[in-house]
Image (spheres, helix red, strand yellow):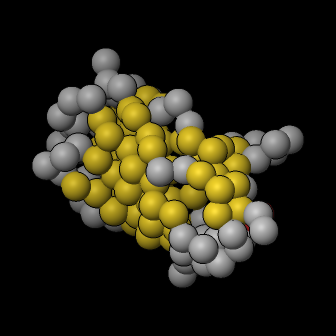
Amino acid sequence: QVQLVESGGGLVQPGGSLRLSCAASRSISSIYTMGWYRQAPGKQRELVASITSGGRLNYADSVKGRFTISRDNVKNTVYLQMNGLKPEDTAVYYCNYKPYVGGNYWGQGTQVTVSS
């Protein structure tokens, strides 16, 4: 079992930046996909960005050019750098980990609110 602990959410003004972190409780698989999803009130959970163990990146069209996903394999941590935040980015952000060997793990979520 792997626990994912997110941090870094908060309240920010439009145009501001935040960096989310997701730390895994133990070493992660050598083959995996990790990603960030978000869910706004009344909406379905959607993929924001993902990264594979091979370094393949994927972004939602709505965040391309503004958000950057990265990882630190030594720290078993994945990050989401969010720049140019907009009110429509307001949501609960969830970290996700899918090892190649099976399983689908979620963090508890961290609230991001973009408002003036």
Residue 85 horizontal/vertical position (percent): 64, 71
Residue situated furthest right in the rendering: 42
Residue 111 horizontal/vertical position (percent): 63, 45
Quadrant of the image for the C terminus? Answer: bottom right
Q: How many marks?
A: 0
Residues 12 and 100: in front is 12
Residue situated furthest bottom in the rendering: 65
Asked where in the image residue 54 lies, by quadrant, the reply is: bottom left
Quadrant of the image for the N terminus? Answer: top left
Residue 88 horizontal/vertical position (percent): 77, 64
On screen, residue 97 above or below 77: above
Residue 48 horizontal/vertical position (percent): 57, 58
Residues 102 and 7: in front is 7
| Residue drawn at point x = 56 percent, y = 42 percent | 110
Query: Does residue 97 appear in the picture of this structure?
Result: yes
Left or right: 71 in relation to 17: left
On screen, residue 99 above or below 38: above
Residue situated furthest top in the rendering: 1
Left or right: 21 in relation to 38: left
| Residue drawn at point x = 70 percent, y = 55 percent | 113
On screen, residue 75 above or below 49: above
| Residue drawn at point x = 69 percent, y = 69 percent | 13
Asked where in the image residue 66 lies, by quadrant, the reply is: bottom right
Query: Does residue 89 appear in the picture of this structure?
Result: no
